[in-house]
Amino acid sequence: MDDLNPQQLAEFRQDLLELQRSLNEAVSLAREGARTVELDQPIGRLSRMDAIQNQQIAKAGLRNQQIRLRQVEAALIALNNGEYGLCKICELNIAYRRLKARPESPLCLECAEEMEQSRS
Ligand SMILES: [Zn+2]
C-alpha cells in the first residue's frame, strides 16, 4: 500500500470532522437518555423497568460513542502530525478501504483481528 496522497488526506479530514460532529451530538443525546430515570418519578413498576433497561442501553451506547470519539480525535491529531493512516502497532499503512469505512481506525486489519482474538 502506498502512502495516502494529499487529496485522500483532505478527504479523511472531512470524514473525521463530520464523524466528530455527529458523535458529539450522539454523546449528548445518550447522556440525556442515561439521565432520564428519576427514582421518585411517579411511573409504574413495569415502565420503570423499561426505563432502567433503556437507560442501560443508553449508557452502553454512550461508552462506545465516547471511545469512538476519542479515536476520531486521535486520528485528527495524527493527521496534523503527518502520521495518519499508520497502524499503531505494526506502523504499516492501513488499507484505504478500511479507513474509508472507519476513518478513525487506529489499527490495520491484521492487528485489529489479532487484538480481537487475544481478547476473547
Ligand atoms: Zn498493524
Image (spheres, helix red, strand yellow):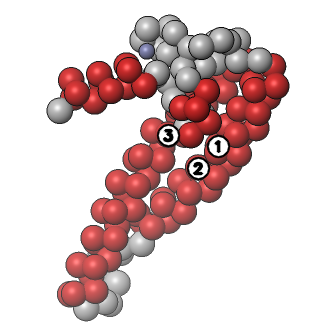
Q: Position of residue 99 (x, y in %)?
A: 58, 31
Query: Within 8 Å of ligand 1, the CB of disc 1?
Result: no
Q: Is residue 47 left or right of residue 20?
A: left
Q: Position of residue 40 (x, y in %)?
A: 31, 81
Secondary structure under badge 2? helix
Q: Is residue 72 visible?
A: no
At 30% from the left and 24% from the top, the residue drawn is 115
Q: Position of residue 60 (x, y in %)?
A: 35, 54
At 37% from the left and 57% from the top, the residue drawn is 59
Secondary structure under badge 1? helix
The residue pinned by badge 3 equals: 68
Quick check: which quadrant has ligand 1? top left
Outermost residue toward the left? 120
Kindly indicate whether the residue at mark 1 contacts the one at mark 2 (C-beta within 8 angstroms). yes
User: Given the image, on which type of amino acid does mark 1 rest?
Assistant: Gln
Q: Quadrant of the C terminus?
A: top left
The residue pinned by badge 1 equals: 20
Along the line of sight, which residue is nearer the eye, 59 or 106?
106
**Mark 3 Cα-neighbour bin, 10 Å: few <14, some 14–19, many ≥20:** some
Along the line of sight, which residue is nearer the eye, 43 or 58?
58
Q: Quadrant of the N terminus?
A: top right
The residue pinned by badge 2 equals: 23
Q: Is residue 115 visible?
A: yes
Residue 34 against residue 117 in the figure, above or below = below
Kindly indicate whether the residue at mark 1 contacts the one at mark 3 (C-beta within 8 angstroms). no
Kindly indicate whether the residue at mark 3 contacts the one at mark 2 (C-beta within 8 angstroms). yes
**Mark 1 Cα-neighbour bin, 10 Å: few <14, some 14–19, many ≥20:** many
Q: CA distance from mark 2 to mark 3?
A: 8 Å
Nearest to N terminus: mark 3 or mark 1: 1
